[in-house]
Image (cartoon, grey):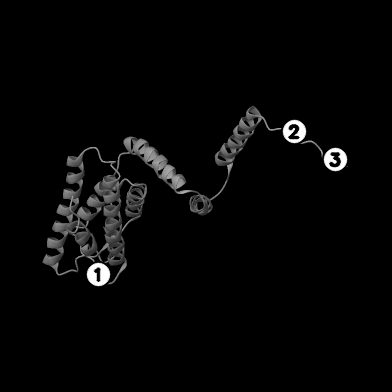
Amino acid sequence: MPAPEVAPVHIHETAKTLGHVNLMVDTLIANATIDEQVLRAITRNLLATGTPSLAAAFTAAARSRLRHTSAKRIATTNGLFTTSLNGIHAIPTPELDNALARARSLYGAGMGLASLGILSSIVQATVGLRWEEDGVMADTLAVIDADISQAIQSCKEELEGGRVNDMAVAQEAIGNLWSGIGESARDVEIWGGEFPFDRASNSIECWKI
């Protein structure tokens, strides 16, 4: 028995099929009731199994979106810390989590210099505060210290990638962060605390821009 003939796939039919698939995916994105963890898992799986160019396109799209939304958003770093029940020791507030999330989105997308403005404000907000050596505040500051180091690495990649148009702006952002870290070091020394930004300080000192 002869094999059945297979109809050739014409170019316009392929294009139509692809258009149909894209429409379906867009419908999924617009209507899916999936939580953030599932969405993150989907995104990570897509990027892990895709080509390096896919990850590059993803971060480029993220930067474009972040530039657009950042222009409309008035960033605030007020109310990042409050005092505990004893009225002496500082503790972080939910607003700090929001500020750190914005900074991480920026440096994670390759916009390290933009994230330094937020991180500098966070460092500056710690000046004048007191905290327990072992407690939630100390743990939080250790996390912020690590965030600054990662942001600086993002800045290096941003510079090496030729995505910085104004070096004066870059130097100002780094200078503001360095100034805040220095002020924090002096303040902590006065009240006998442990300087929380050692890692960040070393990262800046070892960076020649």
Q: Earlier in the sequence, mark 1 or mark 3?
A: 3
Q: At 48% across and 48% down in the image, what residue appears? A: 51
Q: Position of residue 125 (x, y in %)?
A: 22, 54
Please identify, in this view, whether the residue under mark 1 or under mark 2 is nearer the observer. Answer: 2
Q: Residues within 10 Å of mark 1 (few under 14, many from 20)?
A: some
Q: Earlier in the sequence, mark 1 or mark 2?
A: 2
Q: Earlier in the sequence, mark 3 or mark 2?
A: 3
**Which quadrant holds residue 172?**
top left
Q: Position of residue 96 (x, y in %)?
A: 32, 54
In depth, the one of 80 and 51 nearer the eye is 51
Residue 41 to residue 192: above or below: above
Read off the residue under disc 3: 2
Real-space CA distance between mark 3 and mark 2, rounded to the nearest whole angstrom: 15 Å
Read off the residue under disc 1: 132
Please identify, in this view, whether the residue under mark 1 or under mark 3 is nearer the observer. Answer: 3
Q: Are marks 1 and 3 in contact (CB under 8 Å)?
A: no
Q: Position of residue 39 (x, y in %)?
A: 52, 50
In depth, the one of 191 and 17 nearer the eye is 17
Read off the residue under disc 2: 7
Answer whether residue 77 is visible to the viewer in this image: no
